[in-house]
Structure formats: structure tokens, C-alpha cells
Image (spheres, rainbow, N blue to C red):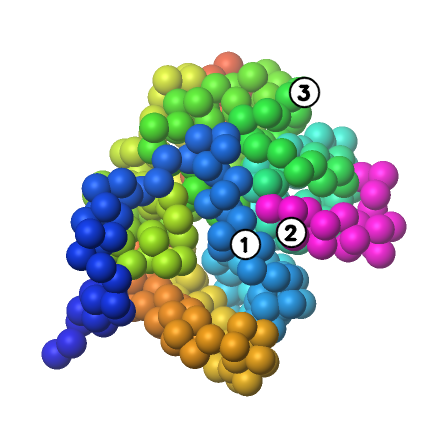
Amino acid sequence: MVTLFQIFDRQDARDSIASRVAGWMQRPRRNTLARSRDNIHRHYDLGNDFYALWLGETMAYTCAYYPSAQATLEQAQIAKMEHVCRKLRLGAADSVVEAGCGWGSLALHMAARYGAKVRAFNISKEQIDFARRRAREQGLEGRVEFIEDDYRNISGSYDVFVSVGMLEHVGREHYPELGRVVQRALTAEGRGLIHSIGRNRPELLHPWIERRIFPGAYAPSLGEMMQIFEPSNLSVLDVENIRLHYARTLRHWLERYEAAIDSVRAMFSDESFVRMWRMYLAGSIAGFETGTLQLFQVLFAKQENNAIPLTREFMYPR
């Protein structure tokens, strides 16, 4: 049987041996302030029109949450946003800072559905422009501010810190720094949530993925994620693994990608690009279904915060 990695390696065979060795030695690419912008640009600035072909109405490019097997992609993405907001006990009086906001769907949901005031950071110009336009169209400019800047430059004080799908681009060596950003940003009764692709144990992404799709990316183990929280005395309250939800999300994305394949070809005029992205989506499904990849949601609070529920019933009260 041909494995997924053998398929990846056949694609890699087109590269020179010297290039492949250099890729192995340097991966993952370091996410310095300057390099992070370049890494993000190579993936997320391929064009909003391309992602709109297969992400659906919400333009959410992270794991959805399926309340039932029959849920549509749009229903599951909205349910994911609700799931996050419920865990954070979000309210109208809350100020929120979001690190890595994508096309703005969660920030807009928090403002529109809960009345929260949100500052959302992202270094992808394409995504920020799209999010600002959506905020204007929905009349939410007064409640949501989209900022084209790095998470390391977050300033101010907030009730809630949230990051969905950004940690993969931070880099292990920057986890303590992220923790310090969270520590200084949260109020004494602040709480936060980080949602990230992960691993059961420390392991690099396959070099084909890191080089061709996600430069600078790394999926951490839970133990590695603790380097965000432990040095900054942040208390972990709850951990949930929803990897099978991501497999289902990716199946929906792949179906829509295949349905739009002629449009993809017309956009990029590159058959290798079409195959590459098909391989990435299909391979990711296999990763989550076999347990090679995990999807962690970690809920946390400031150490001194005792204003926390005694049980989990607050998430979905009867």
C-alpha cells in the first residue's frame, strides 16, 4: 500500500537534492516578526476569491464543531463560534482581544451575537481588508477593530483573550513570549482560550506540508503548549480534543474544492497547484482520522481568578 508520506515524497522528488536537504535542516522556518509576515503571506494571501470557493459563507478556515452528523459546514462553523463563546462565558460587558483573526468571522460573531467589544489582530493584509469590509457591511465598525499587526504587539487590558488557529504559526521557541503577551493583556478576572492543531507527542510536520503549504508551521503536543501557560502562571481549566470534527470539516472543504476545480484551474493556470491543494486537504483528513493530528481547545484563566464555574454545565445548561 502506498502511504500518504510516499505520495508527498514523490512530489518532493521534483526538487533538487540540495534543496531538499536544506529544507530538512532549516524547518520549521523561524517565526520572527519579519519572517512571520512572509510565512503568512505565502499561504493566506493567495486570494480571498480562492478561499471563498470552498470555505463557505463564514470564511472560517479552522475546525468546525458538528452538533450532529447532519449539520452543514455553515451550521458547524457557527456552532464552533458558539462553542468557543460559551466556554469563555462571553457577555456584552466584555472586552476581547483576538490573536490571529483570519477573515474575521469569530470577532464579528462575538460582537453581533454577544455585544462584546473586540480588537482582532492579523498580519495577513488580504484577510484584514476582507474583515474590515464585512464589519462595515454588518454595521459593526463601532464594536470590532481589525488591526493589521503581529500578536506580539498587542497592548491594552481585556477580559478575554482568544486565539483560534494561530498557534500553529507561532513556533515553539515563542510560546513563553505568547504567554507573557496573554498575562499582561488579561485583567485579574480574565480568561482565555487557545484552539490549535496538535500532536500526541512532539513531532515535526512532514517537510512537504511545511515547505509547500504552511511555511513556518508546527503543531504542538499538549506538553509543549504548557510552555505558554506555566511560565506565566496561567491556570488551565479545561482541555478538549475535537480532532474528528476537523476530519469532517476537511471532508466538506474537499467536496467544495472538487466542485470548484475548474475555477481553481482558471485562477492559477497551474495543474500542479490544483493537485497540491487536493493532496493537502485529503492528506489532512487522513491525519485527523488516524490520530496523527489532534485538535486541542485549551481554556485558561489568570492564576488569581476564582470567578470560575464549579462544573461544566455552564457551557450547555439544561
Q: Is residue 159 above or below residue 311?
A: above
Amino acid carrying label 3: it is Gly
**Mark nearer the viewer, 2 or 3:** 2
Type of residue at label 1?
A: Tyr
Near mark 1 (Cα within 10 A), the count class, few <14, some 14-19 or many ≥20, is many
Q: Amino acid at mark 2?
A: Gln
Residue 314 at least partly seen: no
Classify residue 215 as left or right of residue 315.
Answer: left
Q: Secondary structure at mark 2?
A: helix
Residue tagged 3: 156
The residue closer to the viewer here, 60 or 34, is 34
Give the SS element for disc 3.
loop
Q: Secondary structure at mark 1?
A: helix
Name the residue: 25% across, 52% down. 19
Q: Which residues are magenta?
A: 124-143
| Residue 174 in which image quadrant | top left
Decide which of tag 2 and tag 1 comes sooner along the chain. 1
Give the labeled residue for mark 1: 44
Mark 2 vs mark 3, CA separation in Å: 23 Å
* Residue 292 location (% of width, % of height): 25, 57
Q: Which mark is residue 130?
A: none
